[in-house]
Amino acid sequence: DIVVTQSPDSLAVSLGERATINCKSSQSVFYTSDNKHYLAWYQQKPEQPPRLLIYWASTRASGVPDRFSGSGSGTDFTLTISSLQAEDVALYYCQQYYGPPYTFGQGTQLEIK
Amino acid sequence: EVQVVESGGGLVQPGGSLRLSCVASGFTFSDYWMAWVRQAPGKGLEWVANIKYDGSEKNYVDSVKGRFTISRDNAKSSLYLQMTSLRAEDTAVYYCARLEYFLSYWGQGTLVTVSS
C-alpha cells in the first residue's frame, strides 16, 4: 500500500499570509502513460463533508478560488494558499489515487494566527 | 446540480449487519465509478470501497474484505454498501462519493455506530 504523509499536522497562519501544506507519498504516483500525477487535495470544514480542491496534483476543481494552488512531482507535493482568508480554516487532506487502496494523508489542521 | 444523499446509518450491535444506500442525481449515474469513504469520530478519511460504472469491478480496503459488499443499481441511480460482521472499529460517518479517479462530489454522510 502507498503511505501518504502530510506535514505539518497543524498550522497557524496570519490572515493574508501564505499557508503551505506538504504531502509525501511512499512511492511515485506519476503515470508515464498519461503524464499525470494521481494526487488530490480536499478541504473539510467542521461538520461538513470533504470538498475537492485540487486534482492531478495541480488542477483546481470548479469553483475553487485561485488563491489555492497545488504543485509537486514524483512523491512530494504541496498545497499553497497564497493569501489566507478566514473561511479557509479547515482540515486539509491529500490523497493518492494511483492504485488501491486509495490512501489519504492524516490531515493538516489550518488555523488563523 | 450534482447531489449524492446517503441513508441507512444507525446503531448496531457488534456482529450485526447494516445496509447503506446512496441516491445520486444531477448526473448520469451509470457513466461513473462510485466509492464509499469513512471517517471515524475525530479521525481522518479512509477509502472503503469502489465500484466500476457497470458493477463489473470492485475494490475494497483490506480491513473490510469479506465483510462488506459494494453494489449499485443504475436504473435507480443508487449505490449500496452491505456491511456484515460489524466491529466497534467500523464506527464512522460513511460518505458516498462520485469517483473520477479523484472523489469529485461527496454526500453529507451517514453515521454508523457499532456498540452494545
Image (cartoon, rainbow, N blue to C red):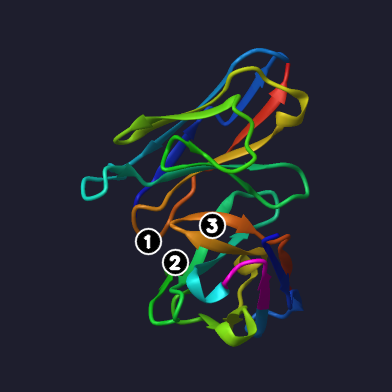
Q: Amino acid at mark 3?
A: Glu
User: Chain under label 2?
Assistant: B
Magenta stretch bounds: B21-28
Q: Earlier in the sequence, mark 2 or mark 3?
A: 3
On screen, residue B24 above or below A43: below
Between the residue at mark 3 and the residue at mark 1, the CA separation in whole angstroms equals 12 Å
The residue under label 2 is B61
Measured as percent of width and height from the top left, residue A18 is found at 60, 15
What's the CA distance linking mark 2 and mark 1? 8 Å
Judging by the rendered image, the residue that carries numbered circle 1 is: A100
Say which residue label 3 marks. B46
Q: Amino acid at mark 2?
A: Val
Q: Is there CB contact under 8 Å for labels 2 and 1?
A: yes
Residue B64 magenta-drawn? no
Q: Which type of secondary structure does the marked residue at label 1 adopt?
A: loop
Looking at the picture, how far across and down is residue A64, in whole percent? 62, 37
Q: Secondary structure at mark 3?
A: strand
